[in-house]
Amino acid sequence: QVQLVESGGGLVQAGGSLRLSCAASGSVFRFYAMGWYRQAPGKQREWVARITSAGTTNYADSVKGRFTISRDNTKNTAYLQMNSLKPEDTAVYLCNALYYPDNYWGQGTQVTVSS
């Protein structure tokens, strides 16, 4: 069982930056692919970014060039650096850990971008 705890959300003006963290319990973090998703009110959950156990990254087109996902296996933590934030980035951001068939989610952290 893996528990994920997100932190780092908050209120920021458009054009600003935030760094989200996802701390994972357990000793197998390094084997998991880590992902960030977001869900805005009234909308479906949307994939944002992914980093594999080998460090390969992928991004949704809507955040490419502005967001950076990374991981520190020594700290059992994944990060999402978000720059040039836009009001449309406002959502609850959730962390995901995947090592088939195990799939875990955090509770989420709120990000609000004001215009």
Image (tube, rainbow, N blue to C red):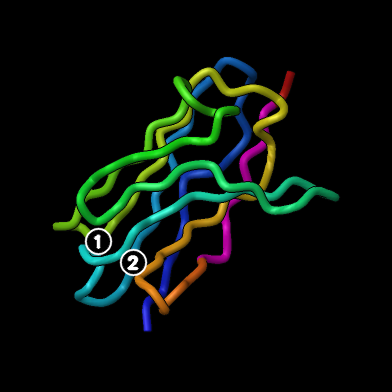
- Disc 1 to disc 2, C-alpha distance: 5 Å
Asked which secondary structure carries label 1, the reply is loop
In magenta, the rendered stretch is: 106-113
Q: The C terminus is located in which quarter?
A: top right
Image location of residue 4, percent across then percent down? 42, 67
Which disc is residue 76 wearing?
A: 1
Q: Position of residue 41 (x, y in %)?
A: 81, 48
Three-letter amino acid code of the residue under disc 2: Ala
Left or right side of 44 for 12: left
- Label 2 element class: strand
Instruction: Determine if the magenta segment contains residue 108.
Output: yes
Please give the label number shown on residue 24: 2
Query: Which residue is outermost to the front?
Result: 100
Q: Is residue 21 above or below residue 83?
A: below
State the mark number for residue 55: none
Q: In this rendered view, identify the residue nearer to me: 56 or 79.
A: 56
Q: Amino acid at mark 1?
A: Asn
- Residue 48, position in %: x, y? 54, 42
